Image (cartoon, grey):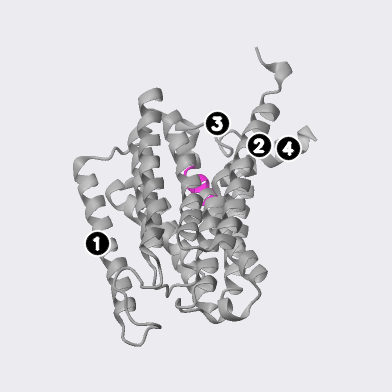
Amino acid sequence: MRRLLLHILPALHLTRVTTAFAAVANVWFIILWTRAEASEPKTSAIANLPLWVLLCGSAMNALGLFGFTTALNDVLDWRRDQTLNPSRPIPSGRVSLPAAVKLVVLSFGAAVLGATALGMPAVLLTLLIAGAILFFNTAGKFIPGLGLVVLGLIYAGQMVVPNLHLRFVIPVWLVMTHALAVAAAVHILGRKAPGLSYRAAFFSVLGWAFWSAVMLGTAWSRNSTPNVVHGGGGLWPEFVPLGAAVLPIGLAAAFAMLVWRRTHLLGRGPRVAEKIARYGALWLSLYAVAWMLGSGHFLEAGILGVLAGIGLLGMTVIREVVAIVEQPLGYRR
């Protein structure tokens, strides 16, 4: 059993599977929200297919894109990791480069296959996101002022793969903003190179403001069109209670406090950056639960809550298994 786990664990490390559930939570939120709200425009797939087919297809798509992103990053950075991160799966020899390339291809194929259950627009959007992921890994992450914005857009794009025509765009905007802020915090606190200069930070904020205007302007246009169901509602659709924003706002404030506390206790460095990245992924699923609870969709909130719980439990269990398998108690001093 230990030998089997030793073969499996590098692949799990390569795909950062402990945070992959956040990507699933994003797409499941869109599907469950669209089906729960009569006023949201529905794709043919969401309107006609069984819920389990939609959830399975979107989960495969989300996990495929997530695996494609992380495995591609390690494949492209393996020479750099030989010097800076020799313990990573490829430089350490636990995963061969050809095996990692196969994982990239298989993950991409799984993402496209999962998108086929959601319709051709989902497939095309998946291809566009994959292109953005490739751009980020080859160029964007080396230009922080651009890369942080691209990363936020990747999160938002992956989230709306099931339905690009939502009227309630605020949750998608929150995910983009949260992802960008977490990436910036991880970059700064983890002392990643190249550093985030004031100029790069300015262009990141400028890019975030531009794409926020695009997203919120799109929401305004969709909700103000005369032929929408039950009339227009501006940025905030009339069918969404204003109280739905209370829990997400509280969660955002709680995350800011968490980052401050962890930084105050641990200081700057890779350790605190890794913790913030993990908690940042968990928060995405909590946002999804919060929006559902605030809007009175308790069944959907329960489904997403179970997903968040499984993700948190899986993250904890896998970390413990990795520690035990890679460094058995009998070998520790």
Specify the segment rendered in magenta: 71-77
- Residue lying at the far right in this picture: please name it: 1
Pointer 2 residue: 317
Report the mark closest to the observer, 2 or 1.
2
Residue neighbourhood size for the residue with mark 1, other residues' Cα within 10 Å, grouped as few (<14), some (14–19), many (≥20): few
Residue 76 part of the magenta segment: yes
SS for callout 3 = loop
- Amino acid marked by disc 3: Ser
Which callout, 4 or 1, points to the residue nearer the camera?
1
Proximity of marks 4 and 1: CB atoms separated by less than 8 Å: no
The residue to which callout 4 is attached is 5
Q: Earlier in the sequence, mark 4 or mark 3?
A: 4
x and y percentages locating residue 279 in the rendered image: 47, 40
| Residue 171 in sight in this render | yes
Q: Amino acid at mark 2?
A: Val
Give whichever of 119, 177 is nearer the camera: 177
Which residue carries the number 3 mark?
87
Of the image marks 2 and 1, the number of the one nearer the N terminus: 1
